[in-house]
Amino acid sequence: MDASVHHKTSTLAKGDTLLAVDNVSLAFGGVKAITDVSFDIKKGEIRAIIGPNGAGKTSMLNVINGFYHPQQGRITFKGETRQKMRPYVAASQGIARTFQNVALFKGMTTLDNIMAGRSLKMNSNLFWQLWRHGPAMREEVEHRRVVEEIIDFLEIQAIRKTPVGKLPYGLQKRVELGRALAMEPELLLLDEPMAGMNLEEKEDMSRFIVDVNTQYGTTIALIEHDIGVVMDLSDRVVVLEYGRKIADGTPDHVKNDQTVIDAYLGVPH
Amino acid sequence: MHALYMVLIDPFVQMVSAPDLFVQTIWEGLVAGVLYALIALGFVLIFKASGVFNFAQGMMVVFAGLTLIAFQDMGLPAIAALAASLAVMYLLALSIERVVLRPLVNQPDIILFMATFGITYILIGFGEMIFGGEPREVNTKAFFLPQGSFEIPILGGFVQIQKIDVAAAVIAALMIAALGFFFQKTRIGRALRAVADSHKAALSVGISLNQIWVIVWFAAGIVALVAGIMWGARSNVSFALQVVALKALPVLILGGFTSIPGAIIGGLIIGVGEKLGEFYWGPLMGGGIESWLAYFIALGFLLFRPQGLFGDKIIERI
Amino acid sequence: MFYREAGQFKTTYPSDMAIFPIAQDRIGIGIILAMAFIFIPLFASDFIMSSVMIPFLVFSLAAIGLNILTGYTGLISLGTGAFMGVGAYACYKLMTIFPGVNIIVWIVTAGFFSAAVGILFGIPSLRIKGFYLAVATLAAQFFLQWCFVRIPWLYNYNASGAIEVGTRTLFGIPIVGPNATPEARYYVLLCIVVVLTWIASNLVHGRIGRSWMAVRDMDIAAELMGIKLLDTKLLAFAVSSFYAGVAGACMMFLWYGGGEASDAFNINQSFLILFMVIIGGLGSLIGSFFGAAFISILPTILKFGLPAIGVPLSGATAEHLIHITVGGLIIFFLIVEPHGLARLWQIGKQKLRMWPFPY
């Protein structure tokens, strides 16, 4: 992908705060999913969110991209603060994501899935769509070119026209990453991108994540259970347990934190 | 201004000025509601236990009713006719399980839903071929069902009540109690609820899906037979009932697809709402609004409570 | 052997994105069009024209409409019949009020009225999903059917309550009304169907089709990617109802030639079109044609074909047999191939591609 394709709209420099989560609490009825969590994500970094099952990691991502609305707290993205927003708005501001259980469009081909990721950037009107000529066709070709670059980058040329429902799990995860990349996000949320993969697939996926981060400067927030991967990839780590933040810092710092060790290994109460 | 008065105020003035008429309308609504509820109950049973949205339930009511009448025509005494009809409903359940459900196990819900359309069509064709297309009446005397009516003085007027309606309500109540007991207290009931939650999980703990399906479709067949008798006793059984049976759908929406009490209360609400609407507001629109009012009542409810009256709030997860 | 893409290299994106990328497909579609435009009118009898071809085309159009909604966007509708009715009545009113304008203009314009009504009844689809939505469309079906009977203005206060169709011409040739020949009606209908099918194919292959399918396959993910759910669903309702409306107008004016319309657009019509879409294949345009052919021609074959080969069949028995056969086939197809005739067609093409080798 050349630079012109992955142009950046924001004026933030590397290291500025891209996203700040302030005192966010989320509850479903009486069940508290997230309690008073604050952290930030700096532009250009890979930020990991870890924690035992049920710690509220996925809920946190859902809050960040507007799918859940927190009862308390604020989210500041690119300097704009909001409490409630539709997922559509989050997407148009440059937040893309992948899902824990692959959420691809199963009946569509790889190509169509990734093209669907370009939806926000396509705007030829209904009239031209009816005839599939003029602006509609030009737009289609232009975005096809971008999508083909993503396909090359992820090395999935051979499955371009295969319906994704027929693909093995590892490839589906890769297509899903491609679909998120097609949105040219400023912040990419990855929910367990390596869950259920074998070692080789994990290595591939890690390579793609690092490449996306270094080549295009995309900021990445990552949930992952494989601690080895987390420690290798991420710049900073947030640790959640029972919906609360128990640690935040560099991988080395977090690794030696007693509360984190207790949370993972369990302590006799 | 006048139009607003006619729509917003006048109907209520009428209700207050003739309270006996108002009560009579409500009673008729409740009676219609019991019948809707009976059909909806069949839906709920099948949906609860197999996740199948059984479009054929209305047709099963017609089919059951006509079968019973045909057996009576053949000169069988009432009890024998009833037993024979039950046997037919059991065979129906068995063949539906064999021919339709078993090959379609683990298909998406929509596919199973469509398959029940197929069942409906076969039942229509088959039924009309055997029983003919004319509306038929159930011989009420043979089943010791009361006939005639009595009047209750109320609020300075009279409310007329058909005895058969009272009987229908009592029988419906008994049946619901029996079903509730069956679901909550018996081993099969527990298996049914397990299957409803997850086919695969139920299979993995050794519950026979095929057996459960036959049982539940048979149970729905029994409910259909009772509904058919009640309906046939009030007016008559004909294939036109199929369209009326569609009204079970708004009932289900109100009550939720899996709740037995929901089906009952939903049925009553729809029945009463429909009759009140038709009686007090219908004339303003030229009448006949009964044909669609139920759907609009349900739609209105849905917009505020998409999960139905008794459903839990849906938390979308991803 | 003869049907394969080997050797047909695509050097530009537009040629790779063409709707028929394989040359043999393009030849095939050419042959079908030639058949439809030249051979069928030349050789088919009036009976075949008016009892087989015209119903087939009308139902194809309606099935494409419903397929856009149910097959492509995943929204079940049980109100297609009523939306067809809106088209028929809108066309009737328009041609009565503006008798000077050509009827074809009004047939197409009627679709927009139907689309507007469709949008109205599609609004609940944002909050309501699956079976719940099916019930919402039943509300449309019964309400509109009620309107067709209770609002005499719609049928110009005719005492019979029926739509009465006078003769209308195109270039001096009667195309609507008692004097129109089956050929003339067939040609008008065929042109409408070809153009609308082409447009439908353009829509589903582009951005709009992708967002429809995205909403169908995983609505939450689609929303998180910036696809507006309400807009997408309403557009599907609008386009779908437009097709249904045009189909309804065609049905009334090019096929029935008037009549008791409220009955023609009842709930059974809605079911019938749903069956066509399912048997043909959800999410497939060609499947809509297969399904329409299957369901609209089957009754004719049973009714006229069996007596012709010596099987005595009364009208009523034929009706019952049709019901049983249609019901049985629905179940049969769901079991063997839940994806409908269109999938069988694809498998056939795949086999042909490999032929004479099995793999």
Image (cartoon, coloured by chain):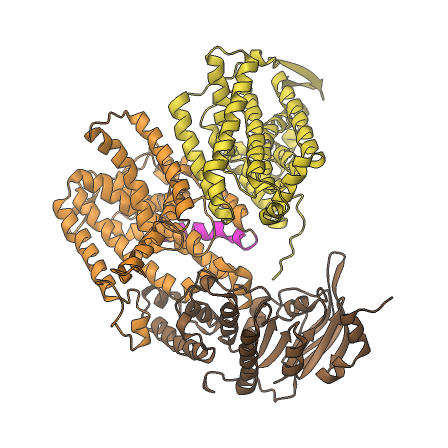
The residue stretch that appears in magenta? C110-127
Colour-to-chain, brown: A
Residue B150, visible in the rendered structure: yes
Colour-to-chain, orange: C
Q: Residue A260, relative to residue B142: is it above or below?
A: below
Q: Examine the image and state in which quarter residue A265 appears.
A: bottom right
- The reply, left or right, for residue B238 in relation to residue B40 is left
Q: Examine the image and state in which quarter residue A227 appears.
A: bottom right
C112 drawn magenta? yes
Q: Residue C232, relative to residue A90: is it above or below?
A: above
Residue B294 in picture, x, y percent from top left: 55, 37
Q: Residue C189, relative to residue B150: is it above or below?
A: below
Residue shown at the point (66%, 78%) measured from the top left = A228
B169 or C237, nearer to the observer: B169
A79 drawn magenta? no
Q: Quadrant of the N terminus of chain C?
A: bottom left
Q: Residue C43, relative to residue A118: is it above or below?
A: above
Chain B representation colour: yellow
Residue A66 in picture, x, y percent from top left: 62, 67
